Every structure is written in C-alpha cells, then in structure tokens.
Image (cartoon, rainbow, N blue to C red):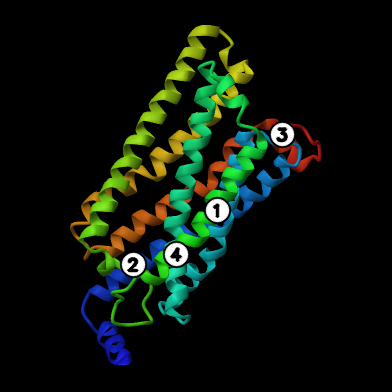
Amino acid sequence: MNSTVAQNISTNGSEPKDTAQYHTVLLVIYSVVLVSGTISLTLMMHILKSSSTSSTSIAVLNLIFTHFIFLITVPFRIHYYITETWTLTLPWCKVVSGMIHIHMYMSFLFYVIILITRLMTFYHKAGQLASFSRMHAFLVSAVVWVVVLVMVPCIIHFSYGQKNQDDDRVCFKFGKSIDEGAKVFNYIISTLIIVVATVLTALQANVLRVLCRRHREGCTSEQDFGAQLKSLCFALIMVVCFIPYHIFRLYYLGHIDIQDINEVFLSLTTFNCLDMLTFMGRRAWYTCFLGKFVCV
C-alpha cells in the first residue's frame, strides 16, 4: 500500500516538484542553522567560563541548552530533505518534528525571563531580585526542564501526529492532527507570543531611549547601556524570528493544506540559534581566540 502511494506521489503532476523545491529551501536553511548555530554555541561556552552565575547567566545557560538539544535533531532533518525519504521510525519522526516547537517555546520563555530581569533591574527594583538567589534560579530551571521532559513525551506519544499521512516514508506533515480544540489553543498561544514580544521590545527600546537622554553624549560607553543593548538584541530576535511565523500560523490554522509553506516559516524561527552572537563584543573575541579570559 505504501509503495503504491509513493509511486503515485512520484508520478503525479507538479505537486511533488513543488514539495522538492520546498525541501531544497529547507535543506539550505537547516544546514546554515546547524553550522552557524554550532559555532555560536561553541564561542559562547568559552565566554561563560569566566562569567558570573547570576540569575541572568543561568537563564542564558538554559537558552544554550535549549539550542543544543535542538541542534542535535537537525542532522535528521537534513538527511530527510536530501534523501526525500524518512527511513527511521514514526515515533522518532514525531520527536524530531516536535523538537522544533519545543525549541521555539522554550527559547521564547527564557528570552522573556532575561528581558523582564533586565527591565526590573533598570527600573530600580533590584530589591525584588535580591531574594531570588542563584539557588532559586537553579531550582526554577530544574522544575521547568522536569515538566518539559515529562509532559512533552506524553503529548508527543498520545496526541501529536495521531492522524499521520498515508505514506510512512514522509515526515513532518502532521497538520491533520490539529483538531478544533488544538486550533483554539494555537490561536491563543500565537496571539500571546506576538503581543508579549511586541510589548517587551517596546519597553526595552524605551530603556535605551531613557539612557541616551540621561547620559546625553557618550551614552554608548556606559556599562548599563551595553547590557540593555544586548537585551534589545534578544527582543529583536524574538520579533524577527518568532512574530512572522506566528502571524502566518494564524492563517495556516484555517488552511492546513499549505503545510509546506508552514514548514518554511517554521524553519525560519530556528535562526534564533545565532542569538549568542549578541555577546560577541570585541573583548569576547579576544577571550575566544587570544586566550584572554576577560568577562564580557
């Protein structure tokens, strides 16, 4: 049955050709993400050897780990788009497919934590953060990952991809599994991400505006300005990588047949793996390549 379906797909009109074109685009995107993301994380690990273990640093470490576990699954995607055939099991296909969503939502969560922490510090509410010790940050991180590692496998096994495509050699096309209840949940999540990312970006931009007005000339030389500028970079990464996909997803949920286009938009969210490059200041490059262990 599967071989018959595969033959019909391979000999049918322009649809396979269009799918192959999308696969070529996806192959290029994921190859770039894998190479550049790996380099970015490697450089960042060198920098963190000398950084303090503040609550923000712990959030950054969680972000690095999120990128790391996603990048492990990228070679499976690249192999699939090269061979045009999924040769592994369906459960593993569902894991690899679901990992990109886990990466996106976990990255968004840690971006929000980093931005809110920096905003609270700027608005003279450091006292609220004083009681939030490094141990508390570690405990919160542990709880988050335990919840993710327990709930996500259950969701993938019992709910994700139950209405699979006819050909088991095709992967990453689980649009038919999105029922009405899941659509409502996705509408809420996408809208929330768009609103939160926009608001946090506006607040972070306002912080830089206030700093520039406060210090007039030479505001870029202030240490606080540099820290807040990095936070703005995180906010802009959310805007550039996440908002376009979630705007498109609001449309896609009503047109499940355009799964190939959705996969392209979804793949663009993975460029946030390059976010660690926001730490690559001049002294950071010296740290990595000249062996001078200097804090950023």
Q: Is residue 278 left or right of residue 27?
A: right
Q: Between marks 2 and 1, how big is the CA–CA gap? A: 37 Å
Q: In the picture, which quadrant includes the C terminus? A: top right
Q: Nearer the viewer, mark 3 or mark 4?
A: 3
State which tag comes first along the sequence, 2 or 4: 2
Q: Residue 147's x, y, as percent?
A: 50, 55
Q: Residue 108's x, y, as percent?
A: 45, 44
Task: Tell me the SS state at disc 2.
Answer: helix
Q: Nearer the viewer, mark 1 or mark 3?
A: 1
Q: Between marks 3 and 4, how big is the CA–CA gap? A: 38 Å
Vertical order, 232 against 209 (above or below) = below
Residue assigned mark 2: 21
Residue assigned mark 3: 52
Q: What's the amino acid at mark 4?
A: Leu
State which tag comes first along the sequence, 3 or 2: 2
Q: Residue 87's x, y, as percent?
A: 46, 82
Q: What's the amino acid at mark 2?
A: Gln
Q: Between marks 4 and 1, how big is the CA–CA gap? A: 30 Å
Residue assigned mark 4: 27
Please state the total of marks drawn on the protein image.
Answer: 4
Q: Is residue 124 left or right of residue 284?
A: left
Residue assigned mark 1: 145
Q: Residues within 10 Å of mark 4 (few under 14, many from 20)?
A: some
Quadrant in the rendering for residue 193: top left
Q: What's the amino acid at mark 1?
A: Trp
